[in-house]
Image (cartoon, grey):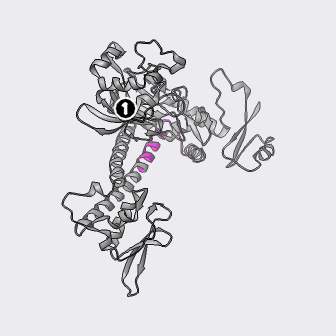
Amino acid sequence: MFKFIRVKKPKEKILDHIKNHLVDKEYFNDYVEVFEVQQSTLKEEPWVFVPPREQNIFEKIERNADCKLRDITDSIFVGLQTSADPIFFVKVIQRLDDKTVKALSKASENEFIMEKELLKPLLRGKDIRRWKIDWKGDFVIFPYIITQMGVKVISSEDMKKNYPLLWEYFLELEDKLKSRDRGAWEGEPNWHAFGRTQNLDMFEQVKIMTQVLANRNSFTLDDNGIYYFVGGGNAGGYGIVLSEKYGKTIENYRYILGLLNSKVLEFYHKYISPIFSGGFYSYGRRYIEQLPIKLPKTTVEQKIADEVGSSVYQILQFKRENDVLVDKVAKFPNPYFKGNEEFEKLINIAKASSLSKESYKISEKLLKTHYLKDLEGKEMFRINLALNEYVDFSSEEVASYVLEVIKTLDRITKRELLELKIPTQPHLESLMNQHRKDMEQIVKNEKAVKELEKQIDDLVYKLYDIAYPERRIIEEYLAKF
């Protein structure tokens, strides 16, 4: 028998606090947990230390599952490991035509024109979010051909012949590519290949993805099978491909995704994964492959599984709609223009202004609007850009428009502000109404997602036969970890 102490969050003189409770058989509060572990329960498998009040739930989840995640997958695979990410990862800044783009890489200060055929959309670990993909427009140069026979690097000769622009890019960075791995690529005919080549044929298919480090279960679905993602270290991701035996239907993917993002499996995962600084957990293969999966066997269980999949589908749709709306709002006002607007300059509309600086750094803290009345008692709407730096308007609609435009900027000059073009009525009213509707829809969609997540959790609790008192323990635990 020995004591196990788990620290939940920092506390002043926490060691003294722990010492005061070492004699207790079991003790817990908001900061620490102290409990006893029977040495006889420790086996060859990785040790999992669970307090007595949660041990029964942990074991019940395992007992009611039919298999581990690894048993229903063809592969749980890590992302790309090129050994030269700054060279292979590029940002497209302009699409030139159907075949070429202009791109930048961190490895060179120059802009390059490249054939887009070998560019694949790339995700960093942080781009793989819960229920969504937050692609930032990054690409990976993928100098490979995938066939039924396997993956083959495009030879130097074929690169030069069929992709001369990309080959020119590689030639500029030839020394850096050859010096990888302590010069191991010197003398290699295909020195432009990736450092490691495993899993290269796994990306272009339907898959569930997760980032390696996250503070909660954050799985999502690539249902179009188009995304590549970074591997290695703690900033990449993992992909999950279901097995043929289990069934690679989109419905099965949605069901498994619902399980993986449920509170039941988040509770389980947070016990088997180490916790890192900042409250992050590991979602590497060695941990997620152990997650206990409940497969529907009865008609009732299949109905529940179908409901889980349906809720997941709705969440994914709401998330995608919000991606479009958030992007639209972030680019305000241009996406709202219809092309028939007439404009006036701010300088001709402002009722008064006090602008003494040449430019203004936009600060969310300082940027505010105020409702005022002038000396004649008429309504006035003021936008403060800094202390004693403001512009007044007689129209709330105009003030709201200007405020939303300024919010999208990091800095604005006095001249840019005074010459800002503002749509005239009724265009302005129509535009601001649509903007408000979009903002309201974003909030409604997020609320709908939360409701659907709750529905999924309730359904998964039923599948794993988790009673209401046990649910409270799970949710209390997840509120702290």
At label 1, counting other C-alpha atoms closer than 10 Å, the crowd grade (few under 14, some 14-19, many 20 or more) is many
Q: Residue most toward the bottom?
A: 376
- Say which quarter of the image contains residue 153: top left
The residue labelled by disc 1 is 227
Question: Which residue corresponds to the image point at 37% horizontal and 55% vertical from the top-left?
Answer: 444
Magenta-drawn stretch, dominant element (helix, strand or loop) = helix
What is the number of callouts on the image?
1
Instruction: Indicate the position of residue 445 as horizontal and vertical percent values.
Output: 37, 52
Question: Depth check: 97 or 260 in front?
Answer: 97
Q: Is residue 245 above or below residue 426?
A: above
- Say which quarter of the image contains residue 208: top left
Q: On the rendered image, what quadrant is the N terminus found in?
A: top right
Question: Depth check: 42 or 261 in front?
Answer: 261
Instruction: Indicate the position of residue 40 as horizontal and vertical percent values.
Output: 72, 24
SS for dot 1 = loop
Q: Residue most toward the left?
A: 340
| Residue 371 is at least partly visible in this image | yes
**Three-letter residue code for mark 1:** Tyr
| Residue 203 is at least partly visible in this image | no
Question: Depth check: 135 or 52 in front?
Answer: 135
Question: Depth check: 474 or 97 in front?
Answer: 97
465 in the magenta segment:
yes
Please indicate whether residue 36 sits to the left or right of residue 479 in the image.
right
Which region is colored magenta? 451-468
Instruction: Indicate the position of residue 44 as horizontal and vertical percent values.
Output: 65, 20
Q: Is residue 59 above or below residue 399?
A: above
Instruction: Indicate the position of residue 273 as horizontal and vertical percent values.
Output: 59, 33
Q: On the rendered image, what quadrant is the C terminus found in?
A: top right
389 in the magenta segment:
no
